[in-house]
Image (cartoon, rainbow, N blue to C red):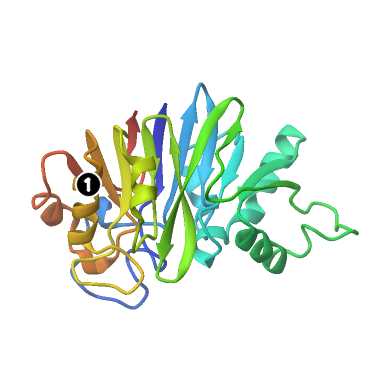
């Protein structure tokens, strides 16, 4: 199983529009972050977690020729805004795109993409097949077991996902002990770390490291990073030996 970080930035991405901080003007490619998304590849099949505003750019960069399914963590715009571009896969492979999401995301997709779900569809619109999931029930895609991990994004419950020895969590602020138990035993953990300072709806760096310590994976990667975290190379030097700052395009084996 491979994991490709399609994007590792927060909702504004990095650089931030109209910002001239040292991170946003950095010439280091690892300081440039598209909106958070990841692709899991199992036996040649690709599964994307979240299709944000940069989805088209990310898929082109990674030269993805086929996509088996999209799993959504939650309904915020930086995680669903690129779904329209799945139609390229519809046209190429002549099949619907399987989408896995909870009821809140399903309602948001209906609101944001009414033309996709209309009884009378305009020619060329995306074709999707929505599979409703929830935080307390595992599900399979192509025989691969996906375990939802429910976390709180301030007051909004959202889903992370565990597949085998990999757990991917983004936009978390708090995680219950029962959900942490689902994560324990993961060899690779991906978790959000927005910035150094406290934030109302995201782990900061200290909180992310504390969570990683509880899970105790072999390796952990930080994602959903803002320009307020600091420059990639500077922050990377502060991390424990088994914790790494992810960057766009990073591919790891699990």
Q: Nearer the viewer, residue 22 or 130?
A: 130
- Asked if residue 191 can be seen in this view, the reply is yes
Q: Is residue 96 above or below residue 223?
A: above
Residue 55: x and y, percent? 52, 52
Identify the image quadrant of residue 144. top right
Quadrant of the rendering where the C terminus is positioned: top left
Residue 80: x and y, percent? 57, 59
Most extreme residue toward the front, as rendered? 178
Badge 1 density bin: few <14, some 14–19, many ≥20, Cα 10 Å? few
Which residue is located at x 21 percent, y 73 percent?
A: 21
Which residue is located at x 34 percent, y 78 percent?
A: 18
Most extreme residue toward the bottom, as rendered? 18
Helix, strand or loop at mark 1: helix
Please give left or right for residue 5 compared with residue 95 in the image.
left
| Location of mark 1 (residue) | 214
Residue 51: x and y, percent? 54, 53
Q: Is residue 99 above or below residue 194?
A: above
Q: Is residue 192 above or below residue 127?
A: below
Which residue is located at x 59 percent, y 32 percent?
A: 140
Which residue is located at x 12 percent, y 49 percent?
A: 239
- Asked if residue 24 can be seen in this view, the reply is no
Residue 118: x and y, percent? 84, 61
Count how many numbered circles sit on residues in the image: 1
Q: Nearer the viewer, residue 220 or 20?
A: 220
Please give left or right for residue 232 compared with residue 19 in the image.
left
Most extreme residue toward the top, as rendered? 43
């Amino acid at each position: 199983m491979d994991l490709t970080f399609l994007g590792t930035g927060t909702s504004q991405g990095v650089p931030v529009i109209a910002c001239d901080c040292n991170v946003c003007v950095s010439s280091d490619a690892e300081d440039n972050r598209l909106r958070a998304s990841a692709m899991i590849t199992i036996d040649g099949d690709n599964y994307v977690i979240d299709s944000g505003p940069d989805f088209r750019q990310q898929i082109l960069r990674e030269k993805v020729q086929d996509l088996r399914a999209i799993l959504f963590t939650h309904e915020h715009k930086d995680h669903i805004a690129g779904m329209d571009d799945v139609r390229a896969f519809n046209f190429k492979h002549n099949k619907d795109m399987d989408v896995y999401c909870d009821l809140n995301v399903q309602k948001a997709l209906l609101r944001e993409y009414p033309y996709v779900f209309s009884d009378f569809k305009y020619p060329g619109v995306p074709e999707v097949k929505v599979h409703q999931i929830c935080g307390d029930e595992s599900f399979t895609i192509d025989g691969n077991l996906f375990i939802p991990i429910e976390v709180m994004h301030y007051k909004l419950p959202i889903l992370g996902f565990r597949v085998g020895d990999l757990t991917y969590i983004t936009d978390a602020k708090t995680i219950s002990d029962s959900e942490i138990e689902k994560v324990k035993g993961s060899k690779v953990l991906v978790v959000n770390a927005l910035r150094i300072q406290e934030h109302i709806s995201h782990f900061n760096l200290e909180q992310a490291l504390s969570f990683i310590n509880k899970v105790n994976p072999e390796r952990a990667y930080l994602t959903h990073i803002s320009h307020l975290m600091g420059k990639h190379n500077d922050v990377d030097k502060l991390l424990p030996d088994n914790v790494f700052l992810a960057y766009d395009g990073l591919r790891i084996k699990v």
